[in-house]
Image (cartoon, rainbow, N blue to C red):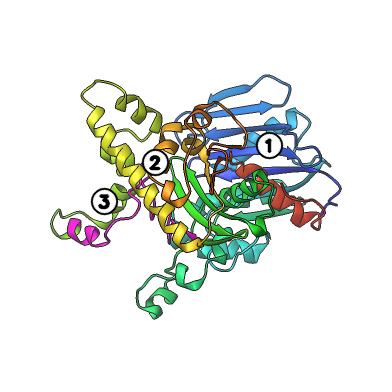
Amino acid sequence: MRNTRGTHVLVLNTGSSSVKYRLLDMADGSRPAGGLVERIGERTSYLRHDPAGGPRREREEPVADHATALEALAEELERDGLGLDSPELVAIGHRVVHGGRRFTEPTVIDEAVTAEIERLVPVAPLHNPANLAGIRTALSLAPDVPQVAVFDTAFHTTMPEHAARYAIDTAVADEHRVRRYGFHGTSHAYVSRGAAELLGREPSETNVIVLHLGNGASASAVAGGRCVDTSMGLTPLEGLVMGTRSGDIDPAVVFHLSRVAGMSVDEIDELLNRRSGLLGLCGDNDMREVLRRMDSDGPDAESARLAFDVYVHRLRKYVGAYCAVLGRVDAVAFTAGIGENAAPVRQAVMAGLRGLGMAVDPELNGAPGDGPRLISPPGSRVAVAVVPTDEELEIATQTYELVSGGTMGRK
């Protein structure tokens, strides 16, 4: 295995039909290159490569599988002198969605780790197989480069047992690994620390409610830098209303749809994961379009308003619940695509929460900005903030710290 004197980390996020990648220089925080391959396995795939200081390179061609996709991105990096054999490449960090109870921190990948990730496929059938494909291909392309798995679930393994357990038969739950795991952990870790930094406090002394609002959405209660509760559960379906996922729902709905509508388990799975949420309520899963329709006089304004109200109501319930869980809240941090960019969502979620010490200043909330910023009125008991997430940097930081012996401090 090569030495660890380099400072470059390649982050790979391998999805079911895509690979996103980013090369980061941990010495100065720069990003020498990045890009994506999408529509893998389709008739025409798309590759985009963005070298720092150079023009974007794009092409459309068939990419049969993840192995071919990773070979293509390796070729693009090689063209920039940043190939997988570069002495500057110290490690490859892989996003892995589900680490179960075993993986509580970033882990150097070996055969045993790969086998355990595969064993967890039944609880993450949409994600772990793709993550494994990326890992195996990268290992074959760069066998001498240390490779690290950073798990979405790891940050949430600090949840106390009473928050992680479902109230079902314990023997059944243990045999089939049924419990609340949580997801988006790299984002929640990064943003909770960023919120503490914005307040000029140590994470260990700060209680934060993090609202990660993208097409997938989750909330977490973070006490002193440790997650004590989160909205997603066994799978990413539980919790908040999302772009296409229902979030919390009476489990008897599944039985009802099976018995009364004659729907199969797979059909109900498809309904709740891909045809629900904002899409199911109003036909659009893009919050920008929902907001546009709400402000129009068109015939679709009413359904868009309902979708928005359901979305916000669920969020506000979780904020209130996590105030009770934490006891003391120092900050609420909005992040991800909707959280960072949709001022009307932030305004609506905080409306009526002054009794909990929470409010947004309309001018601060509506002002454009792309960095961490406070949007609550000066002197508020609870700070309300926008903290842009950077999951790639978080994965790279955890990877680099592990392979370099912890010589680098975090954000």
Residue 347 locus on image (x, y percent): 42, 36
Q: Amino acid at mark 3?
A: Glu
Q: Dot 1 corresponds to which residue?
A: 74
Q: Is residue 30 above or below residue 248?
A: above
Q: Secondary structure at mark 3?
A: helix
Residue 267 is tagged as 3
Which of the two discs, 1 and 2, sits closer to the camera? Answer: 2
Q: Is residue 392 magenta?
A: no
Q: Pick out the residue farthest to the front.
A: 379
**Quarter of the N terminus within the rendering:** bottom right
Q: Is residue 174 above or below residue 83?
A: below
Closest to the observer, 184 or 63: 184
Q: Dot 2 corresponds to which residue?
A: 351
Q: Secondary structure at mark 2?
A: loop
Compute the Cα span from label 1 to label 2: 48 Å
Q: Name the residue: 71% across, 52% down.
A: 399
Residue 373 locus on image (x, y percent): 60, 36
Which of the two discs, 3 and 2, sits closer to the camera? Answer: 2
Q: Amino acid at mark 2?
A: Ala
**First in sequence: mark 1 or mark 2?**
1
Compute the Cα span from label 1 to label 3: 38 Å
Compute the Cα span from label 3 to label 2: 37 Å
